């Protein structure tokens, strides 16, 4: 079986004031459907750059990226956006919750943008809030929630759309051990999870750890 994510000899360069930074240097990596992968490595080693490419937020300068059988590196921005919308759920470091919306409404918002009716939205929002153990906090505003709870609202917002792949860039830190448990549960339900983390405990939950150094994979 071919991998869900196939990265072959991918390089990415940044040009800054006459200098070329080799953010990714000939990376090859396969990730199968249903894997739980932790990405570790020092700051500046290329973790976020790879995550942006996997998430179709950016494209490589060299090499090949095939996602679910589709060649990504050659697509236009609009095609990338569509794949992102259907396949990828992002959990970022800053949760970007809207302060004037309740937990429920924050989770609901992307579904409104998708054009779903109130009736279609409600079960998706409630399921997502339940998956992160926050059903009882659905009427709270972000300022009335702990940092860890806010993080879980952001995860619920990601989940509500049902993406098969979840990408998280350093979401845990010292925040909330429950988040890790949630990732583990989502993985058991068959989702593919890729987490950038500095936390050994998070890495232990993952079935596989990929380590970066200076834009290269080390093992
Ligand atoms: N937009 C950018 N412009 C220029 N250099 C960048 C940009 N993004 C990242 N870099 C550089 O690329 C390298 C890898 O960065 P990054 O992938 O963010 O590392 P990590 O996530 O592991 O901390 C670093 O040297 C960083 O300074
Ligand atoms: Mg980073």
Image (spheres, rainbow, N blue to C red):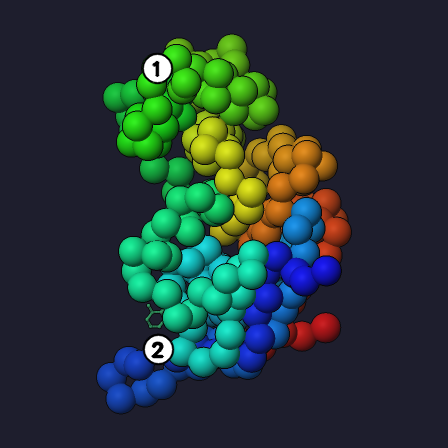
Q: Residue at x 51, y 40 (%)?
A: 163
Looking at this view, name the residue that lies furthest to the bottom: 18
Q: What label does residue 144 carry, if any?
A: none
Q: Closer to the observer: label 1 or label 2?
A: 1
* Residue neighbourhood size for the residue with mark 1, other residues' Cα within 10 Å, grouped as few (<14), some (14–19), many (≥20): few
Quadrant of the frame with the C terminus = bottom right
Give the residue pinned by disc 1: 118
Residue 162 x, y percent position in the rendering: 51, 34
Q: Is residue 97 left or right of residue 37?
A: left
| Residue 187 appears in the figure | yes
Q: Earlier in the sequence, mark 1 or mark 2?
A: 2
Q: How many marks?
A: 2
Q: Residue at x 59, y 52 (%)?
A: 194
Give the residue pinned by disc 2: 14
Q: Nearer the viewer, residue 92 or 63?
A: 63
Q: Residue at x 72, y 45 (%)?
A: 205
Q: Residue at x 46, y 55 (%)?
A: 55
Residue 131 x, y percent position in the rendering: 58, 24
Q: Nearer the viewer, residue 14 or 118?
A: 118
Q: Is mark 2 within 8 Å of ligand 1?
A: yes
The image quarter containing residue 208 is bottom right
Q: Nearer the viewer, residue 119 or 174?
A: 119
Instruction: Report the Cα–Cα distance between label 1 and label 2.
Output: 44 Å
| Residue 97 appears in the figure | no
Quadrant of the frame with the N terminus = bottom right
Tell me if residue 132 comes above or below residue 63 in the rendering: above
């Amino acid at each position: 079986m071919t991998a869900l994510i196939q990265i072959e000899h991918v390089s990415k360069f940044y040009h800054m004031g006459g200098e070329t930074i080799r953010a990714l240097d000939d990376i090859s990596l396969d990730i199968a459907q249903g894997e739980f992968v932790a990405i570790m490595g020092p700051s500046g080693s290329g973790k976020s750059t790879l995550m942006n490419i996997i998430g179709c937020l950016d494209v490589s300068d060299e090499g090949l990226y095939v996602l679910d059988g589709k060649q990504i590196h050659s697509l236009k921005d609009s095609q990338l956006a569509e794949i992102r919308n259907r396949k990828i759920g992002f959990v970022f470091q800053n949760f970007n919750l809207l302060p004037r919306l309740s937990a429920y409404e924050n989770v609901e918002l992307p579904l409104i943008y998708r054009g779903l009716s109130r009736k279609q939205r409600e079960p998706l929002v409630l399921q997502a809030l339940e998956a992160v153990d926050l059903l009882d906090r659905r009427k709270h505003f972000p300022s009335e929630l702990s940092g860890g709870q806010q993080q879980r609202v952001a995860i619920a917002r990601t989940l509500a759309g049902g993406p098969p792949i979840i990408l998280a860039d350093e979401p845990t830190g010292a925040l909330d051990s429950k988040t890790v448990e949630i990732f583990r549960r989502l993985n058991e339900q068959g989702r593919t999870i890729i987490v950038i983390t500095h936390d050994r405990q998070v890495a232990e939950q993952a079935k596989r750890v990929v380590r970066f150094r200076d834009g290269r994979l080390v093992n």
